[in-house]
Amino acid sequence: MTWQGDVVALVGAFRSGEHSPVGEAEATLAAIEASDLNAFSFVDVEGVLERAATVDISLPLGGVPVGVKELHQVAGWPDTAASLLFAERYADHDLTMVSRLRAAGANLIGLTTASEFGGLNCSTTKLNGITRNPWDRAATPGGSSGGSAAAVAGGLVPIATGGDGGGSIRIPAGFCGLVGMKGTAGRIPRGPHTTIGPMTVVSGCLARSVRDAARWYDVCAGFDARDPYSLPAETEWEAGLGSTDLKGLRVAISPDLGSAVLADAVRSRVHEAGHALVEATGMQLVDVDVSMPSITWEWAIANQVGLVREVGDLWPGCEEQMTKSMAFGVRMGLERFNIEVAGRVEAARTEANRCMADLFDRVDVVICASNPDVAFPAEIESNTRVAGEKAPPGNNGALTIPANISGNPAVSVPAGVADGRPIGIQLMGRQHEDRMIMDLARAWELLEPWPLVAP
């Protein structure tokens, strides 16, 4: 059986001799082989066993099995972008975050499934099929880091990489009962081939505990010149957990951020959890109007620039090989994006940044939902549109995209279940205040501990 605890405890078990990296690697491979979650699209069987036999367990992640989102590059592994279009493509380099994981002793297991080009909030593709939620096989684990979330919550690996350009860490974390930390933009560099625009994407992980997310920061965060907008390194993320004085911080509880349409059970739980956290920490509840401008359409159409570039000359002959939503996105990008739309996008981003800054002039923390509802059916390609039309009310983007646009740190943490599927609450702070957000998440974890894996 694989390790069902968190990463920090696993490393401790390796060092004490209670557990072995080889034994854990063998159990991980067996669990993936037996799993019905469809969480992995590629497994490096030989490499996993070789690394386990020679690993240095004194390293921060020495011997820890780690899943890698299939949109992240590992030299020599498939680099498919979760698309049939690139089913035969292989990576010739490591993502900067992957290089840092290797240096910290991580045993990279394989690639976890994602949505095609990272464009949807589910993980269903023509290349890999349907990835399922370990809490309920009829439900999606979310996206685009859905395979990572399913693998961690499903007990296959204790931690996995994620990327978040509009909620792709926090949405699956919320759907699968995990910790999903979207750091301040630039906290973890995205090199070595960093695409600057649209400046909404961050790298991170899907974790079982807050201390695991902090250790990930210790390993992966810090400046790299190939991502010129990455932030300087800071130390002792894990060692410093709990050092923030939360008492007196001003907090607004706004389950819907003023625009999302929430299920009653989610709204009720966010209110209940938020008030419990305020009372336990001594924070100050303030009554402010939280109203984020809708920027979902502008965010989506801007992302089609990169999509069109990646598809390139394969279009339009490749349309039938793509998921309907992503093919629609390419068409809309080609037909609708022009200099006028680019100006509209930048104007909307400017307004969204101003609104977020105004809000954090009045509060220190915002507590809202991670998702408008619990996980939707796995067979549905997506419960949002990609571009070209206004997204329907209640979409996930209304809750997660604002922090991507402005670069604020935000974390999703588990807050119980409804109809057997997890509910996540999202804690959001000012840019660069990642430590405070982690400490707030840790306070909630101590107040209401959650299952580290799905039942």
Image (cartoon, grey):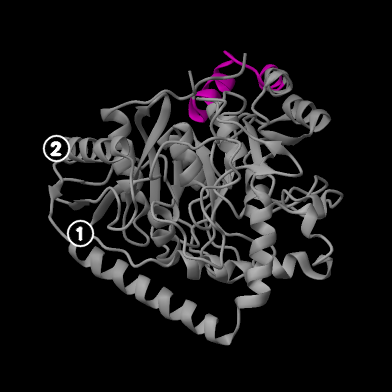
Report the number of discs: 2
Q: Nearer the viewer, residue 341 or 409?
A: 341
Q: Position of residue 156 (x, y in %)?
A: 62, 25
Q: Amino acid at mark 2?
A: Glu
Q: Nearer the viewer, residue 127 or 282?
A: 127
454 inside magenta stretch:
no
For label 1, count other residues whose C-alpha is less than 10 Å away and answer few (under 14), some (14-19) or many (20+). many
Q: Which residues are magenta?
A: 6-25
N-terminal label among 1 and 2:
2
Callout 2: SS: helix
One can see residue 364 in this view:
yes
Q: Residue furthest bottom?
A: 339
Q: Position of residue 394 (x, y in %)?
A: 39, 51
One can see residue 60 in this view:
no
* Residues tagged 1 and 2 counted as in contact (Cβ below 8 A): no
Q: Residue furthest right?
A: 88
14 inside magenta stretch:
yes
Residue drawn at point x = 45 percent, y = 25 percent: 452
When the figure is inspected, residue 421 is found, relative to residue 436, above or below; the finding is: above
Callout 1: SS: loop
Left or right: 108 with respect to 237? right
Q: Amino acid at mark 1?
A: Val
Residue drawn at point x = 79 percent, y = 33 percent: 44
Q: Position of residue 296 (x, y in %)?
A: 46, 64
- Please give the residue where the numbered disc 2 appears in the rendered image: 279
Left or right: 455 with respect to 322? left
Could you tell me what secondary structure mostly forms the magenta stretch?
A: helix
- Please give the residue where the numbered disc 1 appears in the rendered image: 363
